[in-house]
Amino acid sequence: MPATVPSERRMANDIAANLGHLPRERAAEEVAGHIGRFWDPRMRTRLYELVDDGADGLDPLVVAAVKLLR
């Protein structure tokens, strides 16, 4: 693992961890909603790039949320 973790990956995984108690579909919707409302477009773009590059280290809820955002 690289010495530094992209902040978008860390923050998205933290959001997913906090919402992971919800049923999977609802959790993905809530993660997507949070990212859509509160993240700067540049941050969302970097998150999309992380998913496009293989989603290494991303929580599956984050990947599902990105699909909903797109």
Image (cartoon, grey):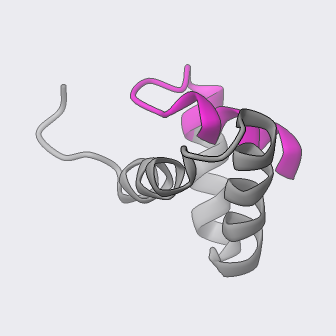
Quadrant of residue 51 in the image?
top right
What count of labels does the image hold? Answer: 0
Residue 37 lies in quadrant: bottom right
Q: Quadrant of the N terminus?
A: top left
Nearest the eye: 11 or 40: 11
Q: Is residue 42 visible?
A: yes
* Residue 12 x/y as whole percent: 50, 53
- 1 shown above or below 48: above
At which x and y percent is residue 55? 53, 26
Image vertical order of residue 53 relative to residue 32, above or below: above
Residue 70: in sight, yes or no?
no
Is residue 16 located in the magenta-colored stretch of the structure?
no
Residue at x 84%, y 52% (from the top left corner)? 69
The residue shown at (70%, 47%) is: 27
Magenta residues span 50-70
Identity of the residue furthest to the top in this view: 54
Please name whichever residue, 49 or 34, is drawn nearer the observer in this view of the structure. Answer: 34
Dominant secondary structure, magenta? helix
Task: Give left or right: position of 48 versus 10.
Answer: right
Q: Taking 36 as reference, is 48 above or below it?
A: above
Q: Nearer the viewer, residue 6 or 60?
A: 60
- The picture places residue 40, in percent across and down from the top left corner, at 64, 77
Left or right? Give the position of 44 relative to 19. right
Q: Residue at x 73, y 44 (%)?
A: 28
**On the picture, is 30 further left or further right than 3?**
right
Left or right position of 16 against 44: left
Spot the residue most to the left. 3
The x and y percentages for residue 63 are: 66, 33
Residue 68 among magenta residues = yes
